[in-house]
Amino acid sequence: MSKHAPLVQEPAPPTHSIGVRTPLVDGVEKVTGRARYTADLQPGPALVGAIGRSTVAHARIRCIDKSAALALPGVHAVITGEDFHAAYGVIPISQNEWPLARGKVRYRGEPLFAVAADDQATAMAALAAVRVELEELPAYFSAAAARAEGAVALHEDRPGNLERRVEQEFGDVEAGFAAADLVLARRFECAEIAHGQLELNTTIAQWEPEAQRLTVHSVTQVPYYLHLTLAQTLGLDPSQVRVVKPFVGGGFGHRVEPLNFEMVTAALARACGGRSSWNSRARKSSSRTADVRTARSS
């Protein structure tokens, strides 16, 4: 027989959350100003960059000539969709989006190329110096028009402009309509909306050419998802990529997926390699307008 009495664990006190104030664990850092967001991080002296975007809604990319931009003094890199290893997407069935358009542009404002230069004026000059030749294609602005017979496919492997077709039937639908007291059909349309987070989109990427290693600080709310997507689009092993998520100033759904400026920033940092380390920052002021800042530290 044991010489010690069995341990008796007292039941935990009941917890109540309804009607009880719950402290915000990171509230003190935010209200005191101690919280550091991505834009608060100091990557050092920065190269200024810009993203060139499509002015049309649908077109085939015939040529992006960056030679004149690269010849400008103070321009360090010009990248296009050809600088990426693979496409990505929000869900596994739609891995058909490129960080910078490749082959075609599919919406007005889609990123086409990005530049990095010593200062804002040089970056803007480089942006203007890139020559883009587009073969404009029909654009459709309603589902009915896109689904109409003969409509040009947005993606060649998606006939009928359908991402995926799923048909499910449960019970006798027609009999249900016939027996209903009222059958009401309405069409609803709403305007485009944008998420209203206060923090602008910002990414800082550091590429270490000797170690072939990438470190990214970003406003993302899905660091593991971003980690996998950076490796996928840049052709890196996941072990070569590290993602750090500082405080995030809101998202409301906007930052629950990898975003193209995060991959563009990382690609710019790598394209400007050859030094001990490079940091790249992308700042996006709206859903379709962005500039990129690349920083160098030694």
Image (cartoon, rainbow, N blue to C red):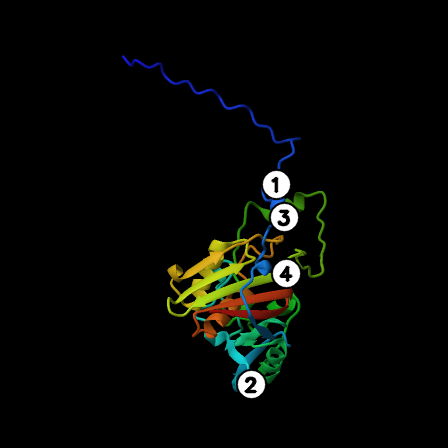
State which tag comes first along the sequence, 2 or 4: 2
Residue nearest the viewer, comparing 189 with 91: 91
Q: How far apart are marks 2 and 1 (CA)?
A: 51 Å
**Labelled disc at residue 82:** none
* Comparing labels 2 and 4, the label whose residue is closer to the camera: 2
State which tag comes first along the sequence, 3 or 1: 1
Q: How far apart are marks 2 and 4 (CA)?
A: 30 Å
State which tag comes first along the sequence, 3 or 2: 3
**Labelled disc at residue 72:** 2
* Amino acid marked by disc 4: Leu
* Amino acid marked by disc 2: Leu
* Amino acid marked by disc 3: Lys
User: Looking at the picture, how far across and down is residue 255, in whole percent?
Assistant: 57, 56
> Who's the residue at 60% across and 80% down the image?
122
State which tag comes first along the sequence, 3 or 4: 3
Kindly state the secondary structure of the residue where label 3 is placed.
Answer: helix
Residue nearest the viewer, comparing 9 with 52: 9
* Amino acid marked by disc 1: Leu
User: Looking at the picture, how far across and down is residue 185, in whole percent?
Assistant: 71, 53
* Comparing labels 3 and 1, the label whose residue is closer to the camera: 3
User: Looking at the picture, how far across and down is residue 40, in whole percent?
Assistant: 59, 59
Q: In which quadrant will I find the N terminus?
A: top left
Give yes or no for contact between labels 3 and 1 (Cβ–Cβ under 8 Å). no
Q: Name the residue under label 1.
A: 24
Which quarter of the picture shows residue 283? bottom right
Q: Name the residue under label 3.
A: 30
Q: Distance between the residues labelled 3 and 4?
A: 16 Å
